[in-house]
């Protein structure tokens, strides 16, 4: 069948069916409408790079030895299980998680809350908030970030206008930049 030729009868019917089948596959794969995925954010499982189209949360599962990367914009994630590494690359993400050996925040304006402890926390992005029970070490290179934990180990800040609040006196503390604070609450 020629691409620009006249299509009639049975050939037209096959072409129409094939076109609709292809469109259905693209929609299910999230290719036709990029913000919409099979996991629609209503509490089902979705991929770590999936987006939420409604008021629900994307659930991402991670085993103890695995790494998960969260990206997108304005997505709510629930990370299930303890992770070896969580990387937050998106913007305006709301992340709820358990424990992680390593948390890296590269995006902007993210809210991250751990119900357990975090190992090494590295923040390269701006305007992020991180809360946890414990944080073994904090390294901040971004600006306007707020981190809070009951127990904090070491702190290193190289950006501006960052705040670390702890229930103890973190040691050692190295701060450069301007407007940064490390305070005991």
Image (cartoon, rainbow, N blue to C red):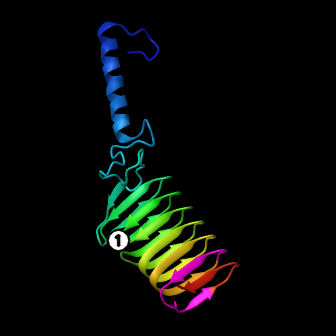
- 82 shown above or below 183: above
Magenta-tinted stretch = 159-174
Q: Secondary structure at mark 1?
A: loop
Camera-side residue of 30 and 118: 118
Is residue 170 rendered magenta in the image?
Answer: yes
> Residue furthest toward the right?
178
- 67 shown above or below 7: below
Please, what is the dominant secondary structure of the magenta stretch? Answer: loop
- Density class for disc 1 (Cα within 10 Å; few <14, some 14-19, many ≥20) is some
- 111 shown above or below 49: below
| Residue 111: % across, % down | 49, 64
| Residue 40: % across, % down | 35, 45
Residue sitting at 37 percent across and 67 percent down?
A: 97
Residue sitting at 52 percent across and 69 percent down?
A: 129
Count the marks.
1
Is residue 123 rendered magenta in the image?
Answer: no
Residue sitting at 50 percent across and 84 percent down?
A: 166
């Amino acid at each position: 069948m020629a691409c620009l030729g006249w299509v009639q009868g049975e050939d037209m019917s096959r072409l129409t069916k094939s076109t609709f089948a292809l469109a259905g596959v693209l929609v299910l794969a999230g290719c036709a409408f990029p913000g919409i995925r099979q996991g629609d954010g209503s509490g089902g499982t979705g991929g770590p790079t999936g987006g939420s189209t409604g008021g629900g949360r994307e659930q991402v599962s991670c085993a103890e030895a695995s790494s998960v990367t969260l990206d997108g914009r304005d997505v709510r994630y629930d990370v299930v299980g303890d992770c070896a590494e969580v990387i937050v690359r998106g913007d305006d993400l709301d992340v709820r998680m358990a424990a992680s050996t390593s948390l890296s925040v590269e995006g902007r304006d993210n809210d991250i809350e751990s119900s357990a402890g975090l190992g090494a926390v590295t923040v390269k992005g701006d305007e992020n908030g991180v809360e946890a029970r414990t944080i073994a070490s904090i390294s901040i290179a971004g600006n306007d970030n707020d981190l809070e934990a009951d127990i904090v180990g070491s702190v290193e800040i190289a950006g501006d206008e960052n705040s670390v609040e702890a229930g103890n006196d973190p040691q050692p503390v190295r701060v450069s930049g301007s407007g940064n604070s490390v305070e005991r609450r």
